[in-house]
Image (cartoon, coloured by chain):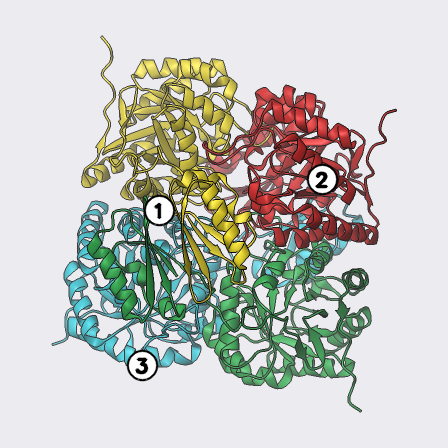
Chain colours: A green, B cyan, C red, D yellow
Amino acid sequence: MILILQNNATDAQIDHVLERVEELGLKHHLSRGTFRTIVGIIGDEEKLHAASLDAIPGVAEVIPVLQPYKLASLEAHPDPSVIDVSGVKIGGGYLGMIAGPCSVEDRDRMMRIAESVRESGANLFRGGAYKPRTSPYAFQGLAVEGLKILRDVGKAFGMPVVTEVTDPRLVETVSEYADMLQVGARNMQNFALLTEVGKSKRPVLLKRGMSATISDLLMCAEYILSQGNANVVLCERGVKGFDSVTRNLFDVAAVPVIHGLSHLPVIVDPSHATGKPDLIPPCAMAGLAAGADGVHVEVHDCPEQAKSDGPQALLPEQYRELASQMKGLAELLGKTISPLPEPLT
Amino acid sequence: MILILQNNATDAQIDHVLERVEELGLKHHLSRGTFRTIVGIIGDEEKLHAASLDAIPGVAEVIPVLQPYKLASLEAHPDPSVIDVSGVKIGGGYLGMIAGPCSVEDRDRMMRIAESVRESGANLFRGGAYKPRTSPYAFQGLAVEGLKILRDVGKAFGMPVVTEVTDPRLVETVSEYADMLQVGARNMQNFALLTEVGKSKRPVLLKRGMSATISDLLMCAEYILSQGNANVVLCERGVKGFDSVTRNLFDVAAVPVIHGLSHLPVIVDPSHATGKPDLIPPCAMAGLAAGADGVHVEVHDCPEQAKSDGPQALLPEQYRELASQMKGLAELLGKTISPLPEPLT
Amino acid sequence: MILILQNNATDAQIDHVLERVEELGLKHHLSRGTFRTIVGIIGDEEKLHAASLDAIPGVAEVIPVLQPYKLASLEAHPDPSVIDVSGVKIGGGYLGMIAGPCSVEDRDRMMRIAESVRESGANLFRGGAYKPRTSPYAFQGLAVEGLKILRDVGKAFGMPVVTEVTDPRLVETVSEYADMLQVGARNMQNFALLTEVGKSKRPVLLKRGMSATISDLLMCAEYILSQGNANVVLCERGVKGFDSVTRNLFDVAAVPVIHGLSHLPVIVDPSHATGKPDLIPPCAMAGLAAGADGVHVEVHDCPEQAKSDGPQALLPEQYRELASQMKGLAELLGKTISPLPEPLT
Amino acid sequence: MILILQNNATDAQIDHVLERVEELGLKHHLSRGTFRTIVGIIGDEEKLHAASLDAIPGVAEVIPVLQPYKLASLEAHPDPSVIDVSGVKIGGGYLGMIAGPCSVEDRDRMMRIAESVRESGANLFRGGAYKPRTSPYAFQGLAVEGLKILRDVGKAFGMPVVTEVTDPRLVETVSEYADMLQVGARNMQNFALLTEVGKSKRPVLLKRGMSATISDLLMCAEYILSQGNANVVLCERGVKGFDSVTRNLFDVAAVPVIHGLSHLPVIVDPSHATGKPDLIPPCAMAGLAAGADGVHVEVHDCPEQAKSDGPQALLPEQYRELASQMKGLAELLGKTISPLPEPLT
């Protein structure tokens, strides 16, 4: 950590700063420049994160040298992690292709959609049973009934299933039915929820919040990892932007940025990132080309009747075409679309 | 609600749109312009929010005409609400002056700070017992022990207390000790938590999320109101900006914008909005001048030893000076700093 | 255009609105809903853009139905434009591969870099002779001397050259030496400059401003087109974001958004978008995968000695590797990297 | 300046870094920490800004210690500057109250508006003769004819006038008619224009760009100052935000931030910052309360007939009421609304 002192810092202030550093059991390194005095601090940066050093009179700025996350960092785990979701691998060259409707709706429709996306090449089926809706008056999901449908559909087609959990009290129940727990963008910094999914054994799909920096996202992954659950897949799904022409601003560079900082796999969600069907295929392709470990796409066979987010879903035939393009690109990039698990006999 | 059709929409598509509107029990009004066909829809817009009309082929854009919130709107309640927090009024000309440290720390320090801010003119004492920290390794708060200290300090000085609740499972416990429940910016869209505080009888201080529009914020207030709790105070505390010179971007215009849309009181929090002590007083004054119904300021008597957020706290003597300036401004504006409640005899 | 009236608009106000519309020679269409009255306006929307209809008492909102640009729109020109830069085609399936250093520096270095990027597959050479630097004390470019070097280098290797023009007084001079004029992000809304390049015969590379919406960008293209210069190529180079981990936020979705609104080609510039060499290749690939009509990359053989923007340049050997990957991707996508023009004999 | 090296930097890389620093004639200070090696550089930071040190292999990050601007900094000029605009002072306790229509329109209307705002307390009259419009088809201003009207109106009422200059070729002409030259937000980084107004003798009103950091803004002021023109007034007029409920996001904290970094006066423009008449008065008051050295408000006597930006103008009677409130606040804050200059006899 580096402290930059104010240019009018007094000697007494400087001495006080050095004393505080020593109290924390750390070494310091004073450097008086022409205009500024700088204090380098050597030792366990952890101790410093806890201290309010920037509140000491005379300190102008505190510059951390290390990242605040450890378990999520590439330094802790230099090789890319491969996360196993009930037999489907994500990361390290394996692609997770997640597809399905926004909400779990009636059983027949779910069966039809699952059959179609499986045939197109998807290896994970998604659907929300608990929906975090911005309006209290909107459809809130089928709850446990939806979880049951989801599990049955997954079994029928041999696809592991992923669904969102929105409340720490529901983690146990959702874990019984789902192969992977999704933490949504609005809950990215719901630390009580992160702690509970961290205690669960299920892999977690952690979506980036709409105004979260990459460092914020990795700190939230750290919450989960620090509870003992190492199976975290990150998801870029668009950040808040100033142009309303798209629903969010798809930050495709987040993919290589994360790969440069962390061993955790990262997938992209062009459905939420753009909110418009005609932008989903080009952004899905862009995500893969940037190195994403998978793609999450909403698919519905009659978007105008969808209980939620219909406008951002692809039709099954549109998904089939996109999946075929993604297969070509995966091959070019030397990646493998993870095969479905062998059914137990 | 208005539907703008694509300029190449076919007659069959237009007929299908009109059928869907009729199915929803609503009337339509077709207008063929030179370049675009437009469908006005007349009737209960509620039904339309649920429908995925923008997913119908041929529809280019859906433009809502009404706000999606009702209970929070000025149309539902044209006069400003006055929220009573155990005797301290906020709104309708009464100012809530909230002050105290970021975290509840040891009892003696809390007593000292409370005594000082009370003397300066604060009428609500704050302190966090459960801290939503971005790092899992940072100080997480004193929990119930902190709640007890907070309640005792409040009683000792006759000040109602406000503290954050971060988990739906804790709402009952926190409600036992605190006069007002704070929902933090990172939990603004934690709908499970909003539902629980909505069921509680305590007034709620709802902070705006870092990338929340005003409409998003009012929808979250609507969650609380729709559960039967009408005592909601909103708080502007800075949104995500691109200039790192301040911690967040203080959106002072949010105050008059909210007053033009909702009857709920809105206060400002220049501590979190700016993150820098020398910016707190000018931004507190700006908030009041823009019409805020109160000001929330963090105060600590030794910021460099604060367990959290030391750098954004004022010293007690700095708060005294600011409070005196705010009194002058309140008078000029014809507002009343809400007096402390009479102690029970 | 649609006017939404305030819910308490009086009959006199409504009558006044209708009169104003009639004064403009347009027809109106009144629709009284349960809660709101709406006025549809039929006729030449142009006339309405000029009028301050939203300032009329009783008008709550004005919603344009048509895009404000015409010549740049897909409606005016449904097929993609193919821009010819001295023999190199951009758009309609042809890719422009622009490479070269940030600033034109000494002749030998320029020759070396040009030779290398040409061999790797670039078909346009770039370099700045007039540099819009944020500091008045920084290197401002070699001016005419730089233009001469650039032209000579281009001739030596048979590559058309592109360079930035920053001042309306310089358009004529720069046009003498360069095959394509670049308007930089900071000058995107420098309307005097847009007007001058619009009068020139040279193709223009128009970069998106850091806080420009797509509609803003297309309006600036419209300025150029409306002066008679139809040869405009747009460039996405990152917008302002809140995460300082990258220099800007690469908005890859801008590519398909623009293709859905305009016939003009759009290329991506991952060098400025990310500011970091290791992010340039994945973002270049992402741009192509999203449908970009070309890629602009800064290349320097000794970035630490570059006169400007060294850190965001690729080394010639890094560019060679990227170019080879881009060739593979172009093939997969059915695009053609535009061949160099045949030298005159 | 501080260089943080990559954690796997080799000894050869470190030696190379030190050599480069020595080549620049500067001293270094090596500090090997547990995880990172850091190089402090002592001497003229100027030389370093020019060098691409972050492009040297092994360097992870370059952290400047000094601000890149000098003449604009508080270190160069510790007391607040007072700018004299033909007798009206701005800064150092004196408030500039700028009012007038967006565009200069017909002479009679200008006379009426000027008379009214002068009576209300405005001390500078504004109006645009050259309008930087986002559409090439919109009203572009009356040009020299507008300048003449503006000058005549100013003379008639003894008010200095301010008007925008948009093109370096027009600086001389505009300087003949106007007392103060405005550089608009879209031209903030039009360095050719900044250089020309820097060479002029007229005071300059420099508006902050929509995505400009405070440091960017001060660097643009530095361009003007470095040409010998010390009379620069800055203006906060809203930055790009994600909530379309206001036209821009009014960054009121910019006022105290600038006062903490620079001696230059800073005024606020709530008209452009919010774009809505009912938000102008609260935001004007907020700006003053935050310490602004003046307020810029658009005023028009018939906004619905305004040639541009009608919706964001106050009516003369609305301005009168706001001006009276601002007078009260100025008094409370101990500021003086600068009196109009004595007419020459």
Left-right relation of C342 to D229: right
State the image quarter where residue A309 is shown.
bottom right
- Where residue B202 sits, quadrant-wise, is bottom left
Whether marks 1 and 3 lie on the same chain:
no
Tally the numbered discs: 3
Instruction: Report the quarter where the C terminus of chain D lies.
Output: top left
Disc 1 and disc 2: Cα gap in Å? 39 Å
Q: Residue furthest right?
A: C345
Q: Which residue is mark 2?
A: C262
Marks 2 and 3: in contact by CB < 8 Å?
no
D307 or D269: nearer the eye? D269
Q: Residue at x 73, y 43 (%)?
A: C294
Labels 3 and 2 in the same subunit: no
Residue placed most toward the observer, C96 or A38: A38
Taking the image as shown, residue D345 lies to the left or right of residue C342, namely left
Q: Which mark is residue D253?
A: 1
| Amino acid bearing label 3 | Val
Residue B144: numbered disc: 3
State how far apart marks 3 and 2 are (Cα): 60 Å
Which x, y percent locates residue D32?
43, 61
